[in-house]
Amino acid sequence: MHALLRVCILVGFVVVRTATALVCADADKSTLARFFLPEADYGASGGRCLDGSMADFYYKPGPGESTTWIIYMEGGGFCSTKAECQMRATSVLGTSTRGPTQKAGLGGLFCSNEAANPGFSNAHKLYIPYRSGDLHAGQRTTTYADWGVFFSGHLHLVHIIDHLKQRNSETNILNAAKVLLTGSSAGGIGTILNAEWFSASAFPNAVVKAAPVSGFFADLSDLNATYPEFIAGDTHPIPLNMSAAADVWDTHTPASCVTAVGNGNPPALCFFAPVSVPLSPVDFLVIESQFDRNPLQSRLGFPTDFARALETDEGRAYLRLYGDVNRAAHQRLDNVFSPSCFDHVSGFGVTSESSTSVSVDGQTVSANALIHDWFFEVNTMPRKIVEDRSASGLPGNPTCSSVDAQTQPSRWRVPACVRACLAGCGASADMLAGSAACACAAAACETRRACSAADAAAVSAALSQLCASAPEQVQEQQERAGEGEESSESGARFARRHGAQGWATLCAMGLVAWAAGTWMGLSCR
């Protein structure tokens, strides 16, 4: 009877959430305490961060006899050269000496409210910081060559689980029955690389499922050119090669994949999700944008000024080709949430609310809702969601960053003076980072200060549309890689709480501030 009630609650959650998008209240967001691996136990066996400080983790036990666990692996790129890694070792991505004393404000699948987060609300919550620079996969117990840094990401996981098992009376980890492994960006890749180990070694008696977020990077060799080469008309296969980095890190790779590819192929081939995920015995649900920005820029040389590049025919043509490759890879998966978005991590949630959604057969499905449905086998949602693109073949999902000039012009065809002003405020046309009042006031100020009279009407229209679309654009900025976990400042929180009217109010405040500054003869910037 109790099990039936749990299923009913979960089904009810899915139905209600798709209609009302339940949000985790601030009071229900989780705060996880910080712990360090003891140096005496793990200092000589791979328990150190890049800089040699001891690895840390954040943990909150589940109430009562909870046997459900959710494990999140933080993202934040990687390093593979001496200079990069030595610089990284001085940051929060390479040392535990600079990490926050607790991990606070975690919502989404970490929310402690059962109505907003059924099943996971009472789970044991484990958050793995990313301080190894090696995609959570390194296995070195000493510093590498003369670099003076440790690559021990996989061993951090091994030792953290061992440390929790040594304290089973407090953690009940030996009785774990259901485990969700997830992570974003580099943490998503780490999820793919470590899922099999978690299932076979860390939790051999539990059901382990993996939901990597923005870590399923397709084989880009089919593109036949980086963006600069595409512009120049120089086409050739893009090498699929991570062997050098794998050797530096002494990388852990999934055993099933290494065995299957065999025949002289390098184990580093298993770094690539399209190769390793289909070969894994672990149940995966891949969460990935069809037009993920990260590989587009980091591997393919797409300009950092995305908006400017996408105003050109060449930029849009290349983006279509890139989307074709990703879309084909996603279509080959059994379980996938693949919205037609131009985002990386942003909007998917996991440790925050999901803002990106896809309409399927009358349902509005978000990443968090689909993870619930799949993990607890509620089975009210399709397992394979590969959203259609816009008519022009470009990202067209209205709940995330989209670039089709016919349907989403305000976010990309923004006058240069507005783009510059927003950038000065730490924001962009597709991401109002921080206070909406700041962005709106800055753009209004720029209208007076730098735009010609001929541009004023266009600036005013663009500003109006940007502010109207702002609720869709407040996004996670640090992929949980830094100390701040909130993706928006107090102004954005106010606006979200009061809906569209709140955003309008903040924009009006910005315009009033500009008008006052003009009247008083003050300079806005």
Image (cartoon, rainbow, N blue to C red):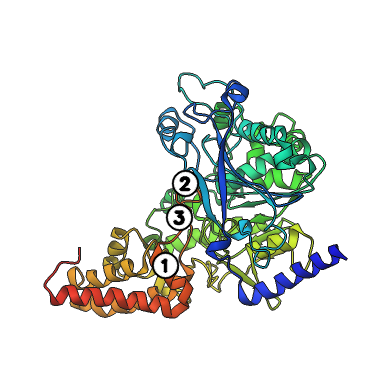
Question: Which amino acid type is shown beneath numbered disc 2?
Answer: Ser
Q: Position of residue 248 (x, y in %)?
A: 54, 27
Please rate how many residues cluster around mark 1, counting C-alpha atoms within 10 Å: few if below 14, some from 14 to 19, many from 20.
many
Q: Secondary structure at mark 3?
A: loop
According to the picture, the residue beneath numbered tag 1 turns out to be 492
Left-right relation of 3 to 208? right
* Badge nearest the viewer, 3 or 2: 3
Q: Position of residue 483 (x, y in %)?
A: 45, 47
According to the picture, the residue beneath numbered tag 2 turns out to be 298
First-in-chain label (3 vs 2): 2
Question: Which amino acid type is shown beneath numbered disc 3?
Answer: Gln
Answer yes or no: is residue 461 visible. yes
Picture quadrant of residue 370: bottom right
First-in-chain label (2 vs 1): 2
Left-right relation of 8 to 29? right
Disc 1 to disc 3, how far (Cα)?
14 Å
Question: Which amino acid type is shown beneath numbered disc 1?
Answer: Ala
Of 485 and 5, which appears nearest the observer?
Answer: 5
* Badge nearest the viewer, 1 or 3: 1
Q: Residue at x 51, y 36 (%)?
A: 133
The reply to whether the C-beta atoms of the residues labelled 1 and 3 are less than 8 Å apart is no
Q: Position of residue 415 (x, y in %)?
A: 30, 70
Please rate how many residues cluster around mark 3, counting C-alpha atoms within 10 Å: few if below 14, some from 14 to 19, many from 20.
some
According to the picture, the residue beneath numbered tag 3 turns out to be 477
Answer yes or no: is residue 360 visible. no
